[in-house]
Image: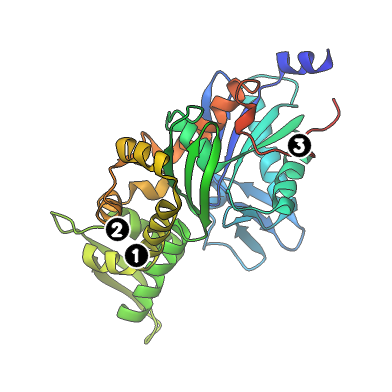
Amino acid sequence: MLDRFYQQFSKDIGIDLGTANTLVYVKNKGIVINEPSVVAVNQRTKQILAIGTEAQRMVGRTPPHIVATRPLVDGVISDFEITEQMLRYFIDKVHNQTYSFLRRPRVVIGIPSGVTEVEKRAVVDAAINAGARQAFLIEEPMAAAIGSRLPVQDASGSMIVDIGGGTAEIAVISLGGIVISKSIRIAGDEMNGNIIQFARENFNLLIGERTAEDIKIRIGSGFALERPLTAPVRGRDLVTGLPKEVIMTDAQAREALMHSLKIIVNNIKAVIEEIPPEIIADIMHRGIILAGGGALLRGLDKLIHEATAMPITIAEDPLTCVARGAGVVVEDLESLKEVLVPLDFGRIPR
């Protein structure tokens, strides 16, 4: 009876709790929040000054006593208290936008497939402490597959590669479960680090993460481009200590990124080698689906196709696949509960 009362007035939500961005899906409304997973904290007072987009603007521009930090590293919680505050902020924001006076939603949260039981428990506890009535977990590749409209509950195999900020998830799905999965901590953030390292070694130039991210988006690629691209790179000269600008080409950016891309491609091939013969036939027909922000990297589909000889399809709106998948589950929790991660601590008393 009490649960029905809560369901009537609270808004159940699906959350893609990503290393780089957090997306929130509200039942019957769609994605209403897409903000960076960044929190600005005053180290002197331990007060949280900003969360999300506002905190992102502070990165690299704060005085020593203010730290703009990401509370998730490689897709898992690194700072429990700050993650809890961030989740509370997003849950409150949803209910302020939807004019709901009861802030006790059921929450479905996407997590990497390779996390430990302790890390799962941390996500559930953070969500419940932030105001969730019930917290459920779904593995990100499963959520991405659902968000990509793959027939995950059918007796046919589907393969998805979800490249996010902290992790790349490779999974084969059939009959509502993950047959084979691999989670590697090489993804968007690592690619940014590759560009920073390349600029340091080849140009004696020190650049920041935001600059590296911008270079990756503007000229990054996984395969030779038909039309060459260039972009100015500004930073500090490591020899003179003075400001410096150089022009980077797409070939140089590709050389920098290739270290991480080769690891991702090799892991995709390793998963393919383990796929049962009946499922490999399904995947050869349907192809591999790319999701996550990494799927937007130019030529990545061609690079994977050349290495695997498989058809490659980029999901529609790959950045929001996990959030949309979590949202589909939120819309129909009863019939899709089999795709959730089984937990014996996932519920709290009503």
Q: Amino acid at mark 1?
A: Leu
* CA gap, disc 1 and disc 2: 8 Å
- Between 52 and 12, the one lying in front of the other is 12
Would residue 175 appear left or right of 222 to someone viewing this image? right
Position in image of residue 33 (x %, y %)? 54, 34
Q: Residue furthest right?
A: 349
User: Which of labels 1 and 2 is toward the front?
Assistant: 1
Write the residue at 30% across / 36% down.
285
Q: Amino acid at mark 3?
A: Gly
Would residue 213 appear left or right of 15 to someone viewing this image? left
Write the residue at 69% across / 49% down.
83
Write the residue at 77% across / 14% down.
4
Above or below, comparing residue 205 to residue 277 in the picture: below
Q: Amino acid at mark 2?
A: Gly
Q: Residue furthest bottom?
A: 239
- Where is the N terminus found, in terms of image quarters? top right
Let me know if residue 152 appears in the view.
yes
Crowdedness near tag 1: few (<14), some (14–19) or many (≥20) residues, C-alpha within 10 Å: many
Tell me whether circle 1 and circle 2 mark residues in contact (CB < 8 Å).
yes
Position in image of residue 268 (x %, y %)? 40, 54
**Residue that carries the numbered disc 3 in the rendered image:** 346
Disc ID at residue 220: 2
Let me know if residue 22 appears in the view.
no
